[in-house]
Amino acid sequence: MTKSVYFTAAEGNAGTRAVARVVIEQLKNDYPNLGLFRAFTNGPITADQEFIDLLELVGRSDDLERAWGTTRQAYVADEDAAMTDLVKRYTDYAHDFDAVVILGLLDGDPVNPGFLARTGRAAANLGTSVFTVFSGAMRTPNQIVDTSHLAAMEIQNENAPISAIAVTHADRKLAAAHGPEGDHTPIIYFYDDEEVKLEDRDRDIIRGAMEHGSPVVTPLSFQSSLIARARADRKRIVLPESSDERILRAADELIAREVADIILVGDADEVRSRAADLGLDLSKAEIVSADDPERIAKYATEFARLREKKGVTYDKAVETLKDLSYFATMMVHMGDADGMVSGAVNTTANTIVPSFQIIKTKPGAKLVSSCFLMLMEDRVYVYGDCAVTTNPNPEQLAGIAVSSAETAVQFGVDPRVAMLSYSTGSSGAGPDVDAVIEATKLAKEMAPDLPIEGPIQYDAAVEPKVAAKKLPGSEVAGRATVFIFPELNSGNIGYKAVQRSAGAVAVGPVLQGLNKPVNDLSRGALVEDIVNTVAITAIQAQS
């Protein structure tokens, strides 16, 4: 993954001009394949002379038109939309580089109200740390400490870590004083009336800032990571619902951003005509006709073999394949696609029943189940099963737990599994609690190295103070990341309650336990949802 750091002044005219140059030159030495990216521009990028000069410094002048995120005018008008554009453009730019310096406030930029908090939000959404610059001019050591502390707190309150601080125009006495290192943030001093240059310790600090990264995962940074991971090993994903405009728009974006190789099922002339009317470029999409006699013969023969014991003949198989979900699922089964995404038009049953009949469960999986990736403000949780398995028995519940933990690992979540109940430990009793106790025992047998706790209530699973009282000494309580609901009622209610009341972004349902990946869309899915689901399916196909 590309390394990055967000370099920014914490106030107007802090003296970034010379500092930015020595920092960038040092990082160019450390990372020859270095990119520069301007987070917010003041207007047309072609008028941003400071950024143009810095691009020239690293030999990247040709990047100007793509190496910026959004404008300050755009974030004033609609910060959410501007932040989405920023992250999307950065993701598409950064994948070409080993490291990227993201440039925030520079000398001469306007200082708008709230810019420090906005800097923190931008850095958190870009999944990086902040290297911030302050001026020491006309300030006592205590004033430097207070100013840097307040600014750092404002940035950190938005879930962005501070990886380095530079103080310009510093008095040499300042270096001996206690700087703003209460949280052990390293400081570089550039002294007043002296040449701006780096000592060996300063070079180590700059490298450390680039290597620092961020443990925080925001909804936007997670979605960005999906795109980056899918792009790293592109897979062929079939979309059978080419009659839907959202599917075509998503396909256009997926192709343009090189997220996956897209296969559309439909009449080629009709699809390309519709794409042209919508101003989309689908020239790189493969378009497969469901009436292709060669494919029908191949797929019908195999489907009839698979369902022979159910009385399916070749002729019945041919008829079944007129359902595009079955046709596309057979493409995945036969190796003509690596995964399928459907459901924008069809029901969940239309999408997943063919996968049960054709692709079936992978070795070791107890059943096909689902989970949602719940994108919280600063982390990702996994909730299962919230969409497929109605009333799982203990063995099935154990299988859902193990599959959900495997899905967590696939998407970068360290699994600590909470088997949810209305009881924590032995605080409650009854058949429902007994079922969770048995499921927990079975799950531990299936995955002995997996941290699993159950039965446990939700508050004890997520809140360390509650966990310390209700289940002291547990490696899961208070730190859970994977939450297994005892049945579909509670699971579906639970994920929607958190989605709607806590503002979490629910990505899914992600189907798990299948031999090959198939995923379902909501019929109300937005283009963004389709793009994310295709990326998820592609990542599943990679493993």
Image: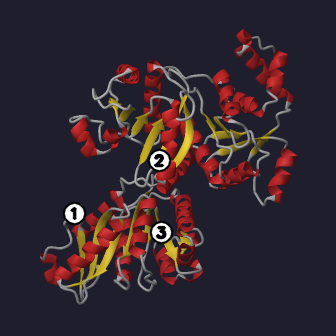
Task: Please name the residue that numbered disc 3 is placed on.
Answer: 36
Alpha carbon of mark 3 to alpha carbon of mark 1: how far? 28 Å
* Colour scheme: secondary structure
Q: How many marks?
A: 3
Residue 336 appearing in the image: no
Q: Position of residue 78 (x, y in %)?
A: 56, 71
Asked if the residue under mark 1 is in contact with the one under mark 3, i.e. CB atoms within 8 Å, the reply is: no
Work out whether mark 3 precedes mark 1 in sequence or the reverse, and give the earlier one. Answer: 3
Task: Please name the residue that numbered disc 2 is placed on.
Answer: 498
Q: Is residue 343 left or right of residue 504?
A: right
User: What residue is drawn where x is 84% and y is 44%?
Assistant: 268
Toward the viewer: 433 or 230?
433
Q: Position of residue 517 (x, y in %)?
A: 60, 33
Secondary structure found at label 1:
loop
User: What residue is drawn where x is 37% and y is 20%?
Assistant: 434
Toward the viewer: 138 or 435?
435
Which of the two marks, 3 or 1, is nearer to us in this view? 1
Residue 138 appearing in the image: yes
Work out whether mark 1 precedes mark 2 in sequence or the reverse, and give the earlier one. Answer: 1
Q: Amino acid at mark 2?
A: Val
Q: Amino acid at mark 3?
A: Leu
Q: Which mark is residue 277?
A: none
Work out whether mark 2 precedes mark 3 in sequence or the reverse, and give the earlier one. Answer: 3
Q: Is residue 116 left or right of residue 70?
A: left
Secondary structure found at label 2:
helix
Q: Position of residue 411 (x, y in %)?
A: 47, 42
Task: Please name the residue that numbered disc 1 is placed on.
Answer: 183
